[in-house]
Image (cartoon, rainbow, N blue to C red):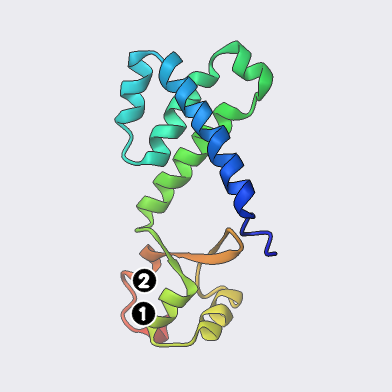
Amino acid sequence: MDSATPPIPMRGSFEHRATRAIERIAREASLESLAAAMAAPSDAGALARILDDMAVDDAARRIDPLVPAIARGGEIRAGLIEAAGGMLSATQVAAMLGITRAAVDKRRQARRLLALRIRGDWAHPAAQFQNAATPEGL
């Protein structure tokens, strides 16, 4: 089985554990923390903000001292992706440029296209294509 696709029991176990954590956070967080989380522009941002606020608690820090940094990193990453116009798959880039997926990969390898490795595949910031006069220029 592909390691990128967890077996169904793993998904169920994760969902159960995450749901318990969210329920606990909803019960224990201050109204101010909940309001700040709800002001985030995305679900991931809301979760990152509330996790950051909850991690201030000393007990949470003792359990996992990296939670605040991980939460902030996730929110920053989401903001950067949004600022880049979102991310496009190599297949989407190929269709947009009228070339093959292999040609996209060659351009990425030649550093003519910017791409990030996300979950085992390449994602391309959309902003790099907004001012391209012709596909040949890429």
- Compared with residue 107, is residue 10 higher up or lower down, i.e. above or below? above
Mark 1 surroundings within 10 Å by alpha-carbon count, few (fewer than 14), some (14 through 19), many (20 or more):
few
Relative to 33, 20 lies left or right = right
Task: Work out whether residue 124 or residue 19 is closer to the camera in this orientation and state it.
Answer: 19
Residue 25 rendering spot, x and y as whole percentages: 46, 21
Residue 104 rendering spot, x and y as whole percentages: 51, 80
**Residue designated by label 2:** 129
**Please, what secondary structure does the residue beneath circle 2 have?**
helix
Residue 92 rendering spot, x and y as whole percentages: 41, 75
- Compared with residue 16, is residue 62 higher up or lower down, i.e. above or below? above
Identity of the residue drawn at 58% across and 47% down: 11
Residue 116 picture quarter = bottom right
Residue 47 picture quarter = top left
**Please, what secondary structure does the residue beneath circle 1 have?**
helix
**Residue designated by label 1:** 96
Residue 137 picture quarter = bottom left
Relative to 21, 82 lies left or right = left
Q: CA distance from mark 1 to mark 2?
A: 9 Å
Work out which quarter of the rendered image holds the N terminus and state it.
bottom right
Relative to 25, 116 lies left or right = right
- Compared with residue 30, is residue 86 higher up or lower down, i.e. above or below? below
Task: Work out whether residue 69 or residue 121 is closer to the camera in this orientation and state it.
Answer: 121
Identity of the residue drawn at 66% across and 25% down: 64
The reply to whether discs 1 and 2 touch (Cβ–Cβ < 8 Å) is yes
**The residue under label 1 is which amino acid type?**
Met
Identity of the residue drawn at 29% across and 30% down: 39
